[in-house]
Image: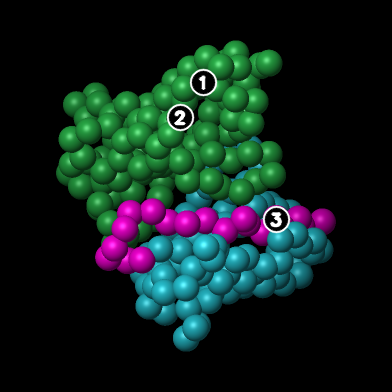
Amino acid sequence: AAGVIQSPRHLIKEKRETATLKCYPIPRHDTVYWYQQGPGQDPQFLISFYEKMQSDKGSIPDRFSAQQFSDYHSELNMSSLELGDSALYFCASSLQNLGTEAFFGQGTRLTVV
Amino acid sequence: AQKITQTQPGMFVQEKEAVTLDCTYDTSDPSYGLFWYKQPSSGEMIFLIYQGSYDQQNATEGRYSLNFQKARKSANLVISASQLGDSAMYFCAMREGLYNQGGKLIFGQGTELSVKP
């Protein structure tokens, strides 16, 4: 079965650079979530989209922005990167009104040097 | 505000024995879902088991079972017959609402489980 695809799997950037993380949800899933997991920490919710509209927002820095496109894939754009942005970034997808589980991608490990 | 607490930073268990990982939660919403995820050292987040707040019976999935005690607001994960491959970080998570409306998960701090041969 198709799963949530995230790219790239690993990314190394320098401070003040920009990074773009991509997420391709499971086909027909209408909701995408982004989470950030710092080293040794639990995942923290950043932002979610339902039917291409932002549906909820967590502790996402102003330097970050995200959107969901017409084909339901989503991108997380991160600018002016800081060392503290080094983390594992997860995307998850689900069906809004059916089912209970959100399926996670394998994550993008971002390292800022 | 919703909150998940896992009070065991690390646990050890002997191979083939059962182990219980603790999770307590707090929410004012009568409708909620509780999840357990496994995160091995490779980093992916693997769904294990789900319990809805109105489910009358405890959820089970193979060797995993969820001991749901609603009045005590606890949702402990029981792993029977531990295997070496069970060594990982385990996260308890909660979502307010039974389905995915609003959908974000709130995670606990995690419990690192080590299975000894």
Q: Secondary structure at mark 2?
A: loop
**Front residue of this view, candidates B45 and A62:** B45
The residue range painted magenta reads A95-113
Cα distance between the residues tagged 3 and 1 = 33 Å
The image quadrant of residue A90 is bottom right
**Front residue of this view, candidates B77 and A47:** B77
User: Is residue B100 shown left or right of residue B44?
Assistant: left
The chain containing the residue under callout 3 comes to A
Residue A18, given in percent of the width and then of the height, sits at 72, 72
Q: Secondary structure at mark 3?
A: strand
Q: Secondary structure at mark 1?
A: loop
Which lettered chain is shown in cyan?
A: A
The chain containing the residue under callout 1 comes to B
Residue A72, given in percent of the width and then of the height, sits at 48, 78
Cα distance between the residues tagged 2 and 1 = 7 Å
Identified at 26% across, 43% down, the residue is B52
Within 10 Å of disc 3 (Cα), the crowding (few <14, some 14-19, many 20+) is many
Coloured how? Answer: by chain
Marker disc for residue B81: 1
The residue tagged 2 is: B63
Type of amino acid under label 2: Arg
Can see residue A82?
Answer: no
Q: Are marks 2 and 1 on the same chain?
A: yes
Which lettered chain is shown in green?
A: B
In this view, A65 is above or below B72: below
Please identify the quadrant where the N terminus of chain B is shown: top left
Q: Are marks 2 and 1 in contact (CB under 8 Å)?
A: yes
User: Is residue A87 shown left or right of residue A32?
Assistant: right
The residue tagged 3 is: A109
